[in-house]
Amino acid sequence: MTRPERDLVAALRAELAAIDPSRPCDRGAEAAGLAAGPTPREGPVARLALRLGRGSLDRDRDQLDRDRDQLDRDRDQDDVLAPRGLTALRAFDWAASPEHCRMAYLRGLFLARGSLSLASGRTHLEFVVPAADAPVLASQLDEEGLPAAWRVRRGRGVVTWKSADTVGLFLRRIGAGGALLELEARQVARALRGDLNRVLNAESANLQRAVGAAGRQIAAIDELDADGRLAQQPPFVRMVADARRDTPEATLGELAERLGVHRSTVQRALERIEHLALHPDEGIGRRTRRRPNAKARNALA
């Protein structure tokens, strides 16, 4: 990530850490989420841990360490207890908790175990948890309408979102405010720049094709004029040739509007001119069998 992107992520985490839950149950839920991670080192998160009660967090972490040790022993034996979630998630009763407690818990878990990346215009949020916790956490997030993918990476569970919309919804629900608005504004600006670049690239490509076609047509007109074949062409073909010479920058539609005919009629006349220039033996002493349409005849009248 660039420096501004890192600063934005840091500001967002600081904003979440500054939230002071008013309900005691929310404070306990957020403390449980924080207890699922290592000792906080970020200043705002460390201060949050102190506010929520450092002593209780230490006791919860000691219990979690004992649970993890027990889980490892059980997995080595018969892998029976792993599905029961005897890990960090045991510190919080998800099923019996209301939504506001769940969001407080997820906020603490994000500050303890989550990371947000905005590199190269892509939004990526992940939780790195014990391997047995990953499917449990993914299931809990799915219950809240925030479906996430999970996998095991180097022995640790990784629960991931790569959708900017889902990440934004999650951050909004756990309390992000000003920093999230800045993040969304940057995403909108990035999307607008991308759309503008695509439009400009398309217009540039169309302009280059038009300039190349006009150059070929004028060269063909000059060649036919030099060997006398242009004078032997139907009047409308000569009219199109003169119009192209007078306005080499004009599009086919502009030429058609000037001559009062359909665009396809002008295109066929120019294609005939280019064809004759590529085949010197054609068009000498012969007139075309194709007659102009009604609009072309009216224009000639």
Image: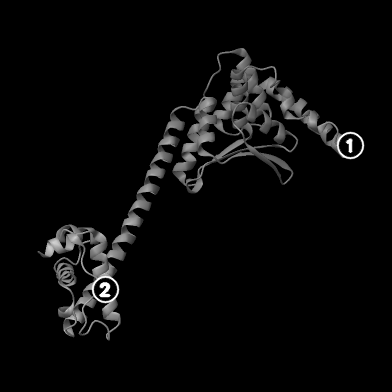
Disc number placed over residue 260 in the picture, else none: none
Do we see residue 37 in this rendering?
no
44 shown above or below 241: above
Do we see residue 248 in this rendering?
yes
Mark 1 Cα-neighbour bin, 10 Å: few <14, some 14–19, many ≥20:
few
Sequence order check, earlier mark of 2 and 1: 1
- Residue at mark 1: 78
Single out the residue that lies furthest toward the right. Answer: 77
282 vs 159, left or right, is: left
Amino acid type at image mark 2: Arg
SS of the residue under disc 1? loop
Q: Residue at x 34, y 61 (%)?
A: 205
Residue 102 in the image: state x and y as whole percent: 62, 22
Q: Residue at x 24, y 69 (%)?
A: 269
Mark 2 and mark 1 in contact? Answer it, CB < 8 Å: no
Disc number placed over residue 272 in the picture, else none: 2
Quarter of the rendering containing residue 142? top right
Q: Nearer the viewer, residue 146 or 16?
A: 146
Amino acid type at image mark 1: Asp
Quarter of the rendering containing residue 182? top left
Residue 236 in the image: state x and y as whole percent: 17, 69
SS of the residue under disc 2? helix
191 vs 227, left or right, is: right
220 shown above or below 36: below
